[in-house]
Amino acid sequence: MELTEVSVGQVSYNVRVDGPESAHIVVLLPGSGEDATVFDAVCERLHGSDLRTVVPDTVDGLDVAGLLALLDGLGLTYVNLAGNREGAELAWQAATRTFGRFKSLVVADTPHPAVAGGDCPALEIPATIVVGGALARADAEASGRRCYSDFRVVEVDGVESVPRDAPAAFATEISLRTSMW
């Protein structure tokens, strides 16, 4: 694993970069109060699928412009995006507001922000919501009305944190979204 420090404005973020050199890169955004280790088991599985992973230590203080600056600092131009909780909220905002930067979106327990009345455009890239215990399936399915590309809802029962408690399911959905078939 390579640990890189990237400055975004006045704030520096530690970013874990790991996995095989690959044309397919997955950026995973943790929730508030979580660190990059929440994705350890997910990343291990993604590396086995020949995917490179990039995980910032936190998303606290990051907005869409900050996330794009972080990706620019790492020299990443076109990536797959995944997130958990607040990291998923940031992922939705970035994927809907930035054309041509993201290939796919996979989020855990977080519907499209407009479902809850937030301000967020429609999504135009393939997306999957993995539903654990924190999100009602109806809210996840309501996100489909705001997704203008392929959209899936996958439910895993009895989990508090999808990346921590169901890493195989989360990694599978990310891997499926990176595939061009």
Image (spheres, rainbow, N blue to C red):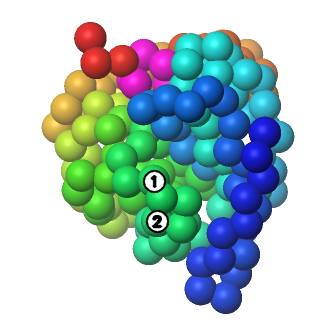
Q: Quadrant of residue 146?
A: top left
Task: Indicate the amino acid at tag 2.
Answer: Asp
Q: Main secondary structure of the magenta part?
A: helix
Q: Residues within 10 Å of mark 2 (few under 14, many from 20)?
A: few
Q: Residue at x 61, y 55 (%)?
A: 86
Q: Are marks 2 and 1 in contact (CB under 8 Å)?
A: yes
Distance from disc 2 to disc 1, alpha carbons, whole Å, reads 6 Å
Instruction: Look at the image and tell me whether residue 24 can be seen.
Output: yes
Position of residue 22 measured from the top left corner of the image (x, y, whole percent): 49, 29
In the visual, does 79 lie left or right of 90?
left
On screen, residue 12 versus residue 113, left or right, reads right
**Relative to residue 74, is residue 156 depicted above or below?**
above
**Above or below for 108 versus 67:** above
Residue at screen point 55% across, 59% down: 74
Q: Which residues are magenta?
A: 174-178
Q: Name the disc covering residue 76, or none.
A: 1
Assess disc 1: are there few (<14), some (14-19) or many (≥20) residues with their C-alpha within 10 Å of its C-alpha: some
Q: Nearer the viewer, residue 106 or 4?
A: 4
Quarter of the figure that contains the N terminus: top right
The picture places residue 80, in percent across and down from the top left corner, at: 43, 38
Q: Is residue 55 left or right of residue 179?
A: right
Q: Residue at x 36, y 47 (%)?
A: 78
Secondary structure at numbered mark 1: loop
Q: Quadrant of residue 144?
A: top left
Q: Quadrant of the C terminus?
A: top left
Viewer-proximal residue, 21 or 172? Answer: 21
Residue 58: give x, y in percent of width and height. 73, 59
Give the label on residue 72, or none. 2
Q: Is residue 166 above or below residue 24?
A: above
Dot 2: element: helix
Question: Can residue 156 be seen from the camera position used here?
Answer: no
In the rendered image, which quarter is residue 111 located in?
Answer: top left
